[in-house]
């Protein structure tokens, strides 16, 4: 999967050099946010999570873009099968399509994103040591929000996202299926070029 991600990045860079800067076909976005797990993982009740995502997008039609990036989310837990005061971390790659459509003549636009993830879950103890790692696997995400154009080339993107990832973790030599499902509220900062 790493090779697929590198191939996509290389194709985007090659296309970048084939177009002028004035086209604004490319953008980079940094999206910090908070996350709320919609269910427990086994006996672990996850607290409010924090994370961020860095993504690149390429606009290949007037309102449609493809995006790819990397994300990190951390959920603290008071107690779980991993011990006391641990955390559940979800990290990996994101990809998909985004649709941005203007609302009349204003600087405001609708935002819809549908995509996938290639992420893994790491469970850390209170000392920060990784006690369990699920390995990477596919999940999905859906997002709605708006885009406010601050200036030429810069936008703010408040949105809400639903993300789901199911993986197997070996606990005491027994494969246990765990699912991380959560809502994420974030504000992206995007620069187009």
Image (tube, rainbow, N blue to C red):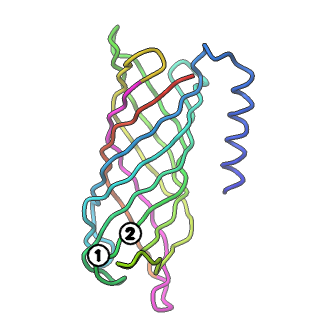
x, y percent for residue 72: 45, 55
Residue farthest to the bottom? 172
Circle 1/circle 2 CB separation < 8 Å: yes
| Coordinates of residue 103 in the picture (x, y in percent) | 34, 16
Q: In screen coordinates, is 141 left or right of 60?
A: left
The quarter of the displayed image where residue 110 is located: top left
At 56% across and 36% down in the image, what residue appears? 56
Q: In this rendering, is residue 13 above or below 125? A: above
- The residue that mark 2 highlights is 88
Reply above or below: 184 against 188: below
Q: Nearer the viewer, residue 19 or 103?
A: 19
Q: Secondary structure at mark 2?
A: strand
Name the residue located 41 percent from the left edge and 73 percent from the top edge: 178
* Residue 6 on image: x %, y %: 70, 48
Residue 91 lies left or right of residue 193; in this view the side is left
Compared across the picture, whether 100 is left or right of 76 comes to: right
Name the residue carrying label 1: 44
* Image quadrant containing the C terminus: top right
Horizontal and vertical percent position of residue 189 = 41, 33
In the rendered view, would you say 164 is above or below 106?
A: below
Say which quadrant the N terminus sits in: bottom right
Residue 78, label in figure: none
Residue density around tag 2, few if under 14, some if 14–19, many if 20 or more, within 10 Å:
many
| 10 Å crowding of disc 1: few (<14), some (14-19), many (20+) | some
Q: Which residues are magenta?
A: 155-175
Q: Secondary structure at mark 1?
A: loop
Q: Main secondary structure of the magenta part?
A: strand
> Which numbered disc, 1 or 2, marks the residue that appears first in the sequence?
1
Residue that appears at 29% across and 82% down:
84
């Amino acid at each position: 999967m790493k090779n697929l991600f590198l191939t996509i990045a290389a194709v985007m860079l090659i296309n970048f050099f084939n177009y002028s800067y004035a086209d604004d076909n490319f953008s980079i976005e940094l999206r910090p946010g908070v996350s709320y797990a919609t269910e427990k993982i086994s006996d672990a009740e996850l607290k409010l999570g924090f994370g961020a995502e860095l993504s690149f997008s390429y606009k290949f039609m007037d309102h449609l873009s493809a995006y790819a990036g990397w994300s990190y989310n951390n959920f603290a837990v008071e107690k779980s099968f991993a011990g006391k005061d641990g955390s559940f971390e979800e990290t990996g790659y994101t990809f998909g399509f985004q649709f941005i459509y203007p609302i009349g003549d204003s600087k405001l636009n609708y935002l819809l994103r549908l995509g996938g993830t290639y992420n893994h879950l790491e469970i850390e103890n209170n000392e920060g040591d990784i006690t369990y790692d699920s390995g990477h696997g596919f999940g999905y995400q859906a997002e709605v929000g708006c885009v406010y154009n601050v200036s030429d080339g810069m936008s703010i993107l408040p949105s809400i996202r639903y993300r789901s990832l199911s993986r197997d973790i070996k606990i005491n030599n027994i494969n246990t299926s765990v699912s991380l499902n959560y809502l994420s509220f974030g504000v992206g900062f995007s620069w187009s070029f």
